[in-house]
């Protein structure tokens, strides 16, 4: 099985000099259909790791190497939606840019599947709840059919049942993708991931496998 995501001894800068804190070294490999969790408290470097793998933070790399098959998509922990567009259009625009046939239908189908109410599709992101905005962000990442999917706290603000439903849809739609899931919710990782990395705060970051790789 060929790797879609390969990270070799990657070390990232969490803060500037002179009191530089680092994350790593991180080494991992994901193939099609694999989901690996990244667990840690706020500030541990989860978002930075995902952003670096998405190609959004190249200057954070101090040493090491990461190889990521494209297309790659990231669902952000914060709102990164266009508030001048509707929820539907936020996803449809991404679908069209990726060359998806009938992007509005694809966007609508995916949003409804993720549990967004039909009457919410025409609303601007600012008129949606936090959980609904989160699902729009996940849909926007999924609709481009990525080879590598990076999810930054995708279930924050969702109740456990809804969170599980969202992740079930993610697993089904992105069944052939490599998925890296960053979260503070260990229960989510225990239910969904085959293994996980633990990012510990304070000084030099420690990365460790916290799950049985065969689980």
Image (tube, helix red, strand yellow):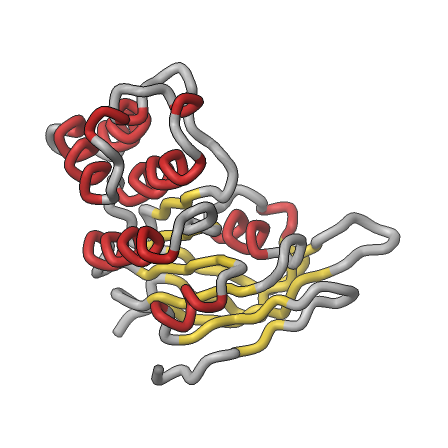
- Residue 96: percent from the left, percent from the top? 23, 28
Give the image quarter of residue 136: top left
Relative to 142, does residue 184 appear above or below in the rendering?
below
- Residue 189: percent from the left, percent from the top? 42, 67
- Residue 203: percent from the left, percent from the top? 78, 65
Give the image quarter of residue 40: bottom right
Relative to 136, does residue 212 appear above or below in the rendering?
below
Give the image quarter of residue 168: bottom left
Q: Which of 142/66 is in front?
A: 142
**Residue furthest top in the image:** 84
Name the residue located 42 percent from the left edge and 19 percent from the top edge.
Answer: 83
Q: Is residue 67 left or right of residue 214?
A: right
Name the residue located 36 percent from the left edge and 20 percent from the top edge.
Answer: 124
Q: Quadrant of the N terminus?
A: bottom left
Name the residue located 54 percent from the left edge and 62 percent from the top edge.
Answer: 65
- Residue 9: percent from the left, percent from the top? 58, 70
Q: How many marks?
A: 0
Q: Which of 180/164 is in front?
A: 164
Q: Is residue 72 left or right of residue 170?
A: right
Name the residue located 27 percent from the left edge and 26 percent from the top edge.
Answer: 120
Q: Quadrant of the C terminus?
A: bottom left
């Amino acid at each position: 099985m060929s790797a879609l995501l390969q990270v070799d001894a990657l070390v990232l800068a969490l803060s500037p000099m002179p009191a530089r804190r680092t994350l790593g070294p991180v080494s991992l490999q994901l193939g099609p259909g694999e989901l690996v969790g990244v667990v840690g408290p706020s500030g541990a470097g989860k978002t930075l790791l995902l952003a670096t793998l998405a190609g959004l933070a190249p200057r954070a790399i101090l040493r090491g190497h990461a190889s990521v098959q494209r297309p790659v998509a990231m669902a952000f922990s914060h709102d990164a939606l266009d508030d001048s567009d509707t929820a539907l259009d936020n996803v449809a625009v991404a679908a069209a840019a990726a060359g998806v046939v009938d992007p509005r239908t694809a966007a609508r189908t995916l949003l409804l599947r993720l549990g967004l109410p039909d009457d919410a599709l025409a609303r601007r992101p600012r008129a949606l709840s936090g959980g609904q905005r989160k699902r729009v962000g996940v849909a926007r990442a999924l609709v481009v059919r990525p080879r590598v999917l990076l999810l930054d706290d995708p279930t924050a603000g969702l109740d456990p049942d809804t969170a599980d439903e969202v992740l079930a849809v993610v697993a089904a739609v992105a069944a052939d993708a490599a998925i890296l899931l960053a979260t503070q919710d260990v229960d989510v990782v225990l239910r969904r991931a085959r293994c996980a990395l633990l990012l510990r705060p304070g000084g030099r970051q420690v990365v460790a496998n916290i799950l049985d790789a065969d689980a």
